[in-house]
Amino acid sequence: MEPLDDSEPSEVGPYRLLAELGRGGMGRVFLGAARDGRLAAVKQVHPKFASDDDFRTRFRREVAASRTVSGAYTAAVMDADADAELPWLASVFVTGPSLGTAVREAGPLPEPAARRLALGLTTALVEIHRVGLIHRDLKPENVLLAEDGVRVIDFGIARAAEPTGVTELTQTGWVIGSPPFMSPEQAEGKDLTPASDVFSLGAVLALALTGRVPFAGTSTLQTLYNVVHNAPDLSGVPAGLRGVVEECLAKDPAARPTPARLLTLLGPVPPTARPWPSAVHGMVAAQQARIGAILVDEAEPPAAAAPVRTATATVPASAHAAQAPAAAPAPMPMPMASPAPAPMATPVPMPVQMAPTALRTAVGPTTTAEPPAPHPSPPVRRRGRAKVVVLTTSVVLALAGAAVGGYFLLRNGGPAADKYLTLPGCQTMAPPLAEATRTAEEDVSVTFPTGSETRCTWNADPVDAEVWWTLRISDGAGNATERQQNEFDEGRGATRTADLPFGDDAYWAAAAEGIDCSLRVRDGNLVVRVDLKGVEHPADTCETKAVDIARTALSSPA
């Protein structure tokens, strides 16, 4: 949660804005106050959507459907305006941490609390599906643990961001969701049914019980492959709920239980005034105190009259070009100042683009999968401090490109100046791999809110080589170099250090099956991985070749 500085809008529609709660691919979310004093989570869409009349039509339709959903286990829609300069939606503000925050800070839920969570989520899905909506992005950050029970947020509105003029998602390859909690059919860009939300519910419940993502991979692409092809990791799920979770995570949508059947399988449970562990209720109380402090501050009379500011688009249409001088990836929902936990608003789902059949061939299975490290908490920003302009927060997966690569726009300010801002195309690696043949159809590029990954492949029997770049970008999630270093150190394990004349740190990874040598090098906020195999890379020359390739890979990005 971030106080607004003097350059920020002070109103959206009839709502007075008190703080920023988060940013995402569809826009920003504010803590707002209605004229009658009620608090609201006010989501204002990104300027890039405002000029799309079809988006406004879809937004209006989805808002109308969302208004009919019961607020018993959801954050009810209060108001919306699809015709405003920047369309917006206001829903009831829910005090309480997200499930993701609660599990990270207080640990997995005990079985009774997790069963109560599952019943609340299932009841919410019954209501959402009743009005013809599919949530499409049920994930821990869209599940709030309120004082009296669970609330599901951000349902239905995600579909407004889908491409224009298509009725079949597979025609465009666009899907909406978060990779670790997508259903297999969602990951492959197929049509969705309510059964897709049931799969996501199973993944969310597994995380709540174990603290781990059941399909976690070493990269976003690997996670998606695991969702489509591999069995979930349910170690640690108690026997009393394991069967329910397994049924929800069936690859075949027809094999999953309906929400109505889930209610029978899970309940009933006895009523209680405190549904969560004490630590979670403590997080709710701390957040209430933080909100109270903001309200007290807002109630103080101003020292001098100030002009009323309205929420209007401030980013020019050309700002999305690569030459734009100021932009930043969107921060994750912002936490409160220590020791209070992160207040959660309505996080925004992230679009993912992929070829519908790409996950069937792009990546092979993995036997080691750890959940991604939690993002460090950024400092709270005070009034008067310059804001960072957000231009894009999409997650884009582009597969099977002849020369894949991604770039990020230059930032204006931020926690630190990142050494690397771009990733190269695969063709930049031609000199040190002249003896190999490019296999462009196996190239992969993944762009997500806080970084990017690119994998390039060369095959010339019997020579095989892969080069991976993993880029992290500084934003609200913290300093990219520090995050990259932490992840690099976590993956090191019992490996052999590589003493190289370039880069900040390097090691020789334990070679996986079929790999002759594997080098990992970190230089600031960029990590390069080189995997070599084949008879042209014997043990006495494999490492020398890998070093030459890594040196080129680090000198390629701008």
Image (tube, rainbow, N blue to C red):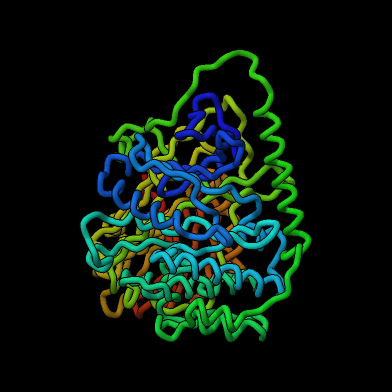
In the rendered image, the quadrant that contains the C terminus is top left
Side of 66 where 424 appears, left or right = left
What residue is shown at x 35% (from left), y 34% (from top)? 85
What residue occupies the far top of the structure in this picture? 304
- On screen, residue 31 above or below 546: above
What residue is shown at x 33% (from left), y 64% (from top)? 444
What residue is shown at x 40% (from left), y 84% (from top)? 254
In the rendered image, the quadrant that contains the N terminus is top right
In percent of width and height, residue 485 lies at: 58, 54
- On screen, residue 159 above or below 118: above
Q: Quadrant of residue 103?
A: bottom right
Residue 244 or 213: which is nearer the viewer? 244
What residue is shown at x 59% (from left), y 53% (from top)? 375
Residue 515 or 159: which is nearer the viewer? 159
What residue occupies the far right of the structure in this picture? 278
In percent of width and height, residue 268 lies at: 66, 78
Side of 188 where 491 appears, left or right = right
In percent of width and height, residue 323 lies at: 31, 36
In percent of width and height, residue 365 lies at: 43, 79
Residue 542 visible in the current orientation:
no
Please state the total of marks drawn on the protein image: 0
Residue 208 visible in the current orientation:
yes
